[in-house]
Structure formats: C-alpha cells, structure tokens
Image (cartoon, grey):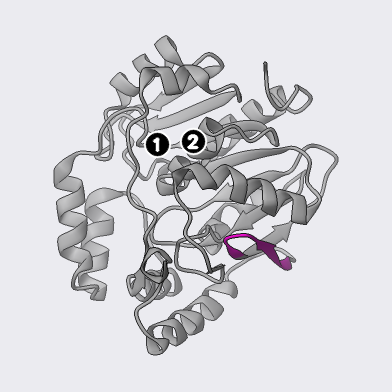
Amino acid sequence: MADKIGRFKNDEARAAHDRAYGELEQLWPLPAELYNIPTRFGSTHVRRSGSGTGAPIVLLHPFPGNGLYWHRFIEDFARDRTVYALDTVGAAGRTIQTAPVGEQNFAVWFDEVMAGLGVERAHVVGYSQGSWTAAIIALHGSRRLASVSLIEPGVFTKMKLRVLFKAIRLSARPTDANLRKLSEWLTPGSQLDDKTMACLKTAIGYQSTVGWPRVFKDAELQSISAPTLAIFGSESLGCDPARSAQRIAEHLPYGESEIYPDMGHAVLDQIPEQVIPRVLSFIAQHDHLPAARG
C-alpha cells in the first residue's frame, strides 16, 4: 500500500518544501485560522479566512500548488463570507496522506473534512487540477455541495498531449528558468512571484499517486446534481473550450459555462476582476438552494 500513498522522495525534499511553504505563507494578506482535520486518508491542512452568513467557499488549488495559491485572490473571495483553502490530499503541501485515495474516494475525503470543520453546505471553487478534484467530488455525490465552480477544467474534453509532454519534460529539470518557461507558455499573462516559484519548485519533489484528470462520459455528466459553472479562456491550451461548452449544454443538467475571449489557461490570473465576480454571482444564486437534487 505504501507505493499508493503520495509522499516526498526523501526527508530533504520535504524539509525544503516546508521552508518554501513557510515563506509563501507570508504573502497571505488576511488573518487566518489553521486546522489539521483528521480523515481516513490522513490529516488535511486547512486555512480559514473571512466571515459571513452565507454558505462558505472551499478553494481547491491547481497542480503542483497548495492552498496558498489563492493568496492573490483571497481578499475578493472572503469579502463577505468564510473561505476555506485546502491543501488537497495527494498533493504537495501540509496535508499528510496516510492511505490510498482513488477517484471514488475524493467525495468521502471532502465530506470528512467538511464534517471536521462543522460545515453542512459549501460552494466549491477549483482551478485547473483543482477543478478536476471539485468535479470528481460532484460526480461521486457529496450532499454537502451547494454549487461547484470549475475554472479551466479538463473533464469535458481531453488535455492536448503536447501540453502534458512539455510539462513532463520541463518539470523533469525543475530549474527556475524551466519553470518560468513552462508557466509563460501554458499560462501567458500569469506572473509568478519568487516565493510562489520557490514553493512550486520544491513541490516537484512530491511523488503523487492521484493521477491526471480524465474526460467524463455523457452519462456521468448527466448524473451530476450540483449546480455547476465552468469558466474557460478561449485560447486555452489545456482543453477545447467551445466543445466543452457544447457538452455542458447538452449533458450537464444544472450546468452553465462562460468563455472569455483572448484569454488562456491563466484566465483567473489574467482577468480576476471579471472571473471572480462571475463566480461570486453564481454562488449567490445558489446560496439557499438544496445541496442536491433527487
């Protein structure tokens, strides 16, 4: 079973990441409460900021980041409600995985984290790999979901193979130059600060066993009962936005999509002043609806 549990390749790699993580924490602009929530898959690290009466927001980060990825956007998300930024199980961060977690387990993991936090219903927002995690949670039926917002998801059409190959090739030598080159190619318009870059560089040393996003079948999309918003950049390298929007319209019962012209995979970084209000408006529309439809 040990080979199915994500971990750093050695103690030195973990120590380097812990140091970089601590440096990145300094960029979090709001007061935060920290939790380590026990689950059957290990202890999940959670950062809470903000307050409000509406259902809270849960943020799921992209690969190879952690919950601190959201430091650039947390002030907007937490303006009038509580927000929880999770270090996802199976990814580099301060969540400690102790048991294998397959696709079908993510809804269980999510429900156990929410139960540990005392949260009955939550709006989940995921970006890139985080949007796959959010979609998997919705697919496998968490009744704690008030809504799901997927930014640049890869579950409606296949990721372009050249993206995967280039990411693997450049991350095999995680120098600052290579990581910046990959970022500039995949997410043009996204400027990474030095602390974020350092944390990403050390995260490459984490050996994840979670796997890559897969495309959902039509019947799977039709089974999702949570209200779902999908956001794309029209020039995304990660998916086919137009085809994705078509599949959402045809197969996702409570789904809607938004494609921003001339934007890429980094659409959130490029135009947060448009993307975040769109997500918050969608969340407000579904704040008082049942968490699931029968």
Mark 1 element type:
loop
Query: Relative to the observer, which residue lies in front, 67 or 118?
Result: 118
Query: Relative to the observer, which residue lies in front, 151 or 95?
Result: 95
Which residue is most to the bottom? 12
The amino acid marked with disc number 2 is Ala
Q: Which residues are magenta?
A: 33-42
Circle 1 residue: 153
Query: Relative to the observer, which residue lies in front, 193 or 248?
Result: 248
Image coordinates of residue 220 in percent, x first then y, are: 44, 23
37 to the left or right of 222: right
- As measured in the structure, the alpha-carbon distance from the residue carrying label 2 to the one carrying label 1 is 8 Å
| In the rendered image, the vertical position of residue 188 relative to residue 150, given as above or below | below
| In the rendered image, the vertical position of residue 116 relative to residue 43, given as above or below | above
Image coordinates of residue 134 in percent, x first then y, are: 52, 40
Which residue corresponds to the image point at 61% horizontal and 40% vertical from the top-left?
Answer: 124
Magenta-drawn stretch contains 36: yes
**Residue 135: mark:** 2
Which residue corresponds to the image point at 63% horizontal and 36% vertical from the top-left?
Answer: 142
- Which numbered disc flags the more N-terminal residue, 2 or 1? 2
